[in-house]
Image: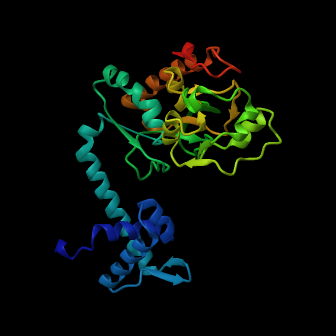
Amino acid sequence: MDLRQLPALNALRAFEAAARHESFSRAAAELFVTHGAVSHQIRGLEAELGVTLFARDGKRVHLTDRGRQYAAEVRAALVSLAESTRHIRSGDRDRRLIVSMLSSFAPRWLTPRVGRFIEKHPEVDLELLSRNVLTDFNSDDVDVAIRFGYGKYAGLHTEELLDEVFFPACSPNFRDGALPRLPRDLETMPLLQSDEELWRPWFDAAGLTDVPEPKRVVLYEDSSNLLQAAMDGQGIALVRRSLSMPEIAAGRLVRLFNIDGPSPWKYYFVCPPALMETARVQAFRNWIFDEAEQFRLLYERPPAVCDAPATPLKALS
C-alpha cells in the first residue's frame, strides 16, 4: 500500500469529529478551530476521495451512507493510532501528572503552594495547564481538573475543594489612604469587577437593596488582572476570597467591611474515576486537600478589621 495516497491527518481528524457529532460547529469546538476550517477540511477530503461524505441541508449536515461507512473505518484507525501512541509514551506518562485549571486560579492560588508538592513527590512530573476552557477528559490529555462551577460533572469523580465568596478590596494607599468607611460610600467610588463577580449580590448582602448594579464599572476578563488593578490603586475591586487572601495577608490589599457576597460557584477536584486509582492522582489529591484545609484556617481566623478598613489585615499573615 502506498501511504502517500492517504489523506492528511488533520482532514481525517476533522471528518471523524464532524461525523461523530454530525455537526461542523461542534467538531470545530472540540478541535479548537473555526467552523470554516472544519468545512474546508471536509470539502477538500471529499474532493480528494471523489465521494460526498455529508449531505448538506441548510446549516445542518448528515452523513451519507458511504460517509457513515468511511467514518467508522477512520475512527477505528485513529483510535488504533492513538492507542499505539499511548503505549509508546506509557513509560514516561505514568510519571506525568497533568492538571488543568483556570488561568486566574493557577498563579494566585496553586503556584505559590505547588513547590511543596514537588518537594514531597519527586517521583511525579507535574504539568500545569492554565486555561479558561472546560477540560474534555475524552479528548484532552489531562489527569485532573480544578473546576470552578456547580459541581455537576456527569461520569466524573467530583469532590468539593473550596467554597467561595466575594467582597470589596482595594490598595491601602487608594485615595491616599482615605478609604470608604461605610458600604454606601462605594456609590461614589470607582468600582472594578471581573466577568464572574457582580456587585448586585454583594450590595444585597450589605443591605443596599436600593443601590442599582453599577453601570460605569471597569470590567476585567481575568480575575488575576483585576487583583493587580486593585493593588495598583485603580479602584475598589469585587474580589474572590480564594485569590485575594494572600494579598490581604501581605498588606498589598485591604478588605473593606466584613460582609461576604454569596457565590453560586465553588472549586471542585475532578478526574475520571479510573484515574483516581493511580498513585500520581492520589498523591496530588491528598496534597491539594491538605493545602485547602490550611487555606481555610487562614481565612477563618477572626478578621482584625470589620468596619474600620484603613488598616491592612495583618493578623491574617
| Residue depicted at 46% across the width and 65% down the height | 27
Question: Which is more toward the observer, 43 or 303?
Answer: 303
- Quarter-of-image position of residue 47: bottom left
Question: Which is more toward the observer, 234 or 163?
Answer: 234
Task: Inspect this view and state whether residue 231 appears.
Answer: yes
248 with respect to 53 (left or right)? right
- Quarter-of-image position of residue 82: bottom left
Question: Which is more toward the observer, 155 or 187?
Answer: 187
163 with respect to 74 (left or right)? right
Return the x and y of residue 284 as percentages of the image width and height.
41, 28
| Residue depicted at 42% across the width and 77% down the height | 67
- The quarter of the image holding the N terminus is bottom left
Return the x and y of residue 34 as percentages of the image width and height.
44, 68
Q: How is the image coloured?
A: rainbow
218 above or below 174?
below
Task: Inspect this view and state whether residue 271 appears.
Answer: no
162 above or below 22?
above
Return the x and y of residue 57 as percentages of the image width and height.
55, 83
Question: Which is more toward the observer, 299 or 134?
Answer: 299
189 above or below 176?
below
Return the x and y of residue 198 as percentages of the image width and height.
66, 44
216 above or below 109?
below
Q: Residue furthest front?
A: 176
Numbered circles on residues, count: 0
| Residue depicted at 70% across the width and 34% down the height | 261
Q: Residue furthest bottom?
A: 50
